[in-house]
Image (cartoon, rainbow, N blue to C red):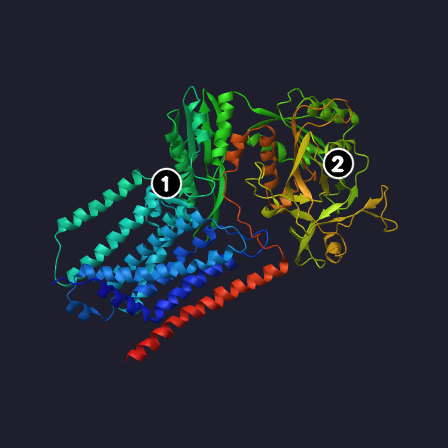
Amino acid sequence: MKVKFGPLVKKELFSLLISPASYAALLLFFIGSAVNFFVVEQFFTIESGSSDLRFFFSIMPYLCILVIPSLTMNLWAAEHDFIDSIPYSSFHISLAKFLSSSLFFIVALLLSLIIPLCASFFADIDTAQLVSGFLVMVLCGLCYTALALCISLIFEHQIASFLVTAVILFIINTIHLIPLYVPVSKYISSIIRFISFAWHFDAAGKGILDSRDIFFYLILITVFVTVTVFIKEKRKGKNYAPITIFLSICACILFFITTSLYYIRMDTTKTKLFSVSKISGQLLNDAEEKIQLRYYVSDELSRLYPQVRDVKDFLRALALKSSNVSLEIIDPEDENIEQTLSALGVQSQQIQTVKGNETSFITVYSSIVIEYLNNFELIPFTLSAESLEFDLVSRITILLQGYRKTVYLIEGTELSLEKDYSYVIPWLEASGYSVSAAEESNIHFDDITSPLIVIGSNFNESTIQKIENFIIDGGRAVFLVSGNNTEVYTDWSSHPIHNSGLQSMLSYWGFSIDQGLLMDIANYRITMQSSNGNSYDYINYPLWITILPHYVYEHPVTKGYSGLELYWASPLSVFSTEQSTISVLAESSPQSFIQKPFSVSTGNSAEDDENEYVTDPYSLKNMSFSSLEKKSYPVLAVLEGTVPGYYSTLRSRYTKIAVIPDHYAVSNMVEYTNSAHNLDLLINTLLYLCDDEALLSLKNKKVSVYDVYKITDASVFSRTKNAVFISVFMAVPCAVLSIPLIVFIRRKKNV
């Protein structure tokens, strides 16, 4: 007689529908995901909130530790007599229980999609990342369910089943963290990483569909369901031959090895961050000899950080892209080549680990050495694939060309280039530039193809004329100039700069650095020691401006925008002419305003050297600026075209000029905001000035910024936030809890 499978699945689903534990699991999964995304990750906090779905998916494998045992603990309990009396095989019974509990988990996962849906009202959501993460999370959840199904058959008591399953899932989820606390061998570490369920989900959470992870889950699902059937059959008195078990184990091992050796990675990120671009392939094919890549990475680092796998995979993909590339991945500790690496300039890094009750530091390597025709370039330390392609291509380009591009750098502020702008030259050199920094008395711009960086505006007329001649000849330059000087190391008092010839020349070209200090409600929160000295105050400082993504325009310079902070910036106004076009690439928020200088003696506006501004954080906190005009001001603008001579009667050749109205933007002030955004944007600007579109496009291949920006009005933001909290933490739970009530009423009516 042919037995229908559908009614058995319906019976198992009905058992879950009338079980209180099922609804507790649904709510736990949903509320846990929401709390982590909205509260723990501070989604609604301006500047730190992010809609990056890695924060959404990261908690799910750990929520499954409690959710899955809740769904499976009662699947076998007190049903053996009934199950044995129905005309179904052990396979059909096990499969029905697996499918029903899996469907319930998928419902929980679908319910959690309300969270990114709510987040989409405030920020951009990467749909591809959501789909890839969801699909692999389904497989991950099914794998948990299959394992839990097997355990619940072994431990028939509900409480025992729940506890044992939760403990085993906890161990499997966190086992990859063991090397953080216990020293293990390289091979043990590899095995530990391989069996960790959470480790295999890491790539999908970033938007990568990796066949190794997919087959890992599929094979284990098959194994756990098969083991469950074996156990059920054995209890019926059927024994399987040892050869059958042996061959099954061998088949699983063979599948695991095959899928690990031959795999496919599908990059679903918006910028194709983990894929090798055509630009790289064309560059590699231009090489006349082999390009040797050597990745020196400590095994200890590999077992601590899943991101290292992304680096290895990208390097392998690059080597497969062209026959002109060879790759070696080397563990320096195994090869005992630390001294050789030191001679090459490869430096180790120290990371903190906890072993037992002791905190210690271990020395690790993650450096890439690129060799071509006996010349070397180095990527000193890398821990992710985010900017890896740009770093590799920029250095390979240097090796193929045989030289580094030069960038001119001059500084005219009250500060020191060596002391107060100490990050600029190393950052430029790390990006592949050779920096020519000259004193004002010895300035020569011999190569107009090399870009110029001008910091500050305190230059004599001779220097300004040299800058003008450089631009007239077709040179490109970026100017970081302020209309004020601030005592950055003392009381932060600020005074206007008067009679700046450089600023007058920029104004003649269309960039007017106006008098005043730019202030904005979108600003950095600083930490100040309180008056009693025993605590700290956190104050929003409107003179340290944060430029959010929605105030940045689509342009090659800002396409990969990661942030921009300004310190005591000046208001900038721009105008275009028939011969030149000025584009604003970034601006302050519509709620920004200008603080005009005041006379120290009278408190009235004045135009003398005693003018200064109110810059004290506590004083600004208690002041009202409601009467001042609020509007957006440019903070980054670029010119393309020709400009007239300010001192000369000539007109320039075609040129590009960029202006940022803040000469502190790339100073050591970046230490206060703990950010390298400004220096990163400086490199983007230089690539744009030099027409390096290919390199700039690679540099823009980075993790997308998902800042909370769509709602700018504070009152609307607050209302929408409250609506989200009510929907997520009240409406949805009430809707879930109404389901068992409806089921109970329907059952009562049927009775």
| Amino acid type, mark 1 | Arg
Residue on which the image places disc 1: 265
Asked if 53 appears above or below 477 in the picture, the reply is: below
Residue 210, percent across and down?
A: 36, 43
The disc label shown at residue 62, or none: none
Name the quarter where the C terminus is drawn. bottom left
Which badge, 2 or 1, is on the more N-terminal residue?
1
Residue 231 seen anywhere in this rendered image of the structure: no
What crowding class fits label 2: few (fewer than 14 Cα within 10 Å), some (14-19), or many (20 or more)?
A: few
Q: Residue furthest front?
A: 578
Residue on which the image places disc 2: 414
Residue 435, percent across and down?
A: 62, 27
What crowding class fits label 1: few (fewer than 14 Cα within 10 Å), some (14-19), or many (20 or more)?
A: some
**Residue at screen point 37% across, 30% down:** 320
Is label 2 or label 1 in front? 1
Quadrant in the picture for residue 637: top right
Q: SS at mark 1?
A: strand
Quadrant in the picture for residue 305: top left
Residue 631, percent across and down?
A: 70, 49
| Amino acid type, mark 2 | Glu
Name the quarter where the N terminus is drawn. bottom left
**Residue at screen point 54% across, 40% down:** 560
Give the left or right position of residue 738, taking residue 557 as reference: left
Q: How many numbered badges does the structure rendering display? A: 2
Mark 2 touches mark 1? (CB < 8 Å):
no
> What separation in Å lies between label 2 and label 1 (alpha carbons)?
52 Å
**Residue at screen point 18% across, 57% down:** 230
